[in-house]
Amino acid sequence: MNYLKKIKGLREPLPAKSSYLEVFFVFFGGFIAIAIVGYLTNSYNNIFVMGSFGATCVLLFGFPKSPFSQPRNILFGHLISTFVGLAFFHLVGDYWWSMALSLASASSLMLLTRTVHPPAGSNPLIVFIMQANWDYLIFPTALGAIILILVGVTYNNISKNRHYPLYWF
């Protein structure tokens, strides 16, 4: 019975509503970041964008004070998760259980290294779906994450009410 009570929730109040100015600021930050990696992808023979970067932008511009949004977490969370996905895909094989183990391993490694970045949790799955090669660790994972961090540092500090990052590495 105690378990069923938990499912009902704590009935906490909803988070405070964001101002329209804050919503516009987040909108424009996400637009700039993805526009840059999208432009680079279209202009060069390398991929700079991947699906999980959309969720990274939500955290980076919508919640810049979150531990999940800090440069350390963005960069290493993406690198660890992509590397683990690539290792399982190439060394173990393209199996449903290998994909599941890669996700579980990546999540655990992010926790152990204090580099949790929830959007990066999708990277092992992206690796399996795309059947990515090892260069996916550099293009788009590392360089794309670095570009997002640089845009986040530049853009978030334009506002007098923001200070980003809270810490680096």
Image (cartoon, helix red, strand yellow):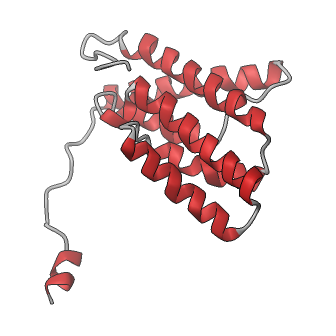
Residue at 45% x, 10% y: name it: 154
> Is 111 on the left-hand or right-hand side of 147?
left
> Is 124 on the left-hand or right-hand side of 75?
right
Residue at 52% x, 43% y: name it: 120
Total tally of numbered discs in the picture: 0
Expressed as whole percent of the image width and height from the top left, the position of residue 49 reads: 68, 32
- Work out whether residue 73 can be spotted: yes
- Work out whether residue 24 can be spotted: no
Expressed as whole percent of the image width and height from the top left, the position of residue 148 reads: 54, 23
Q: Quadrant of the N terminus?
A: bottom left
Depth check: 7 or 96 in front? 96
Say which quarter of the image contains residue 43: top right
Expressed as whole percent of the image width and height from the top left, the position of residue 64 reads: 34, 28
Depth check: 19 or 99 in front? 99
Residue at 51% x, 28% y: name it: 75
Looking at the image, the residue that sits furthest to the front is 91
144 vs 6: above or below: above
Looking at the image, the residue that sits furthest to the bottom is 1
162 vs 89: above or below: above
Say which quarter of the image contains residue 129: bottom right
Expressed as whole percent of the image width and height from the top left, the position of residue 111 reads: 38, 46
Q: Quadrant of the C terminus?
A: top left
52 vs 96: above or below: above
Say which quarter of the image contains residue 94: bottom right
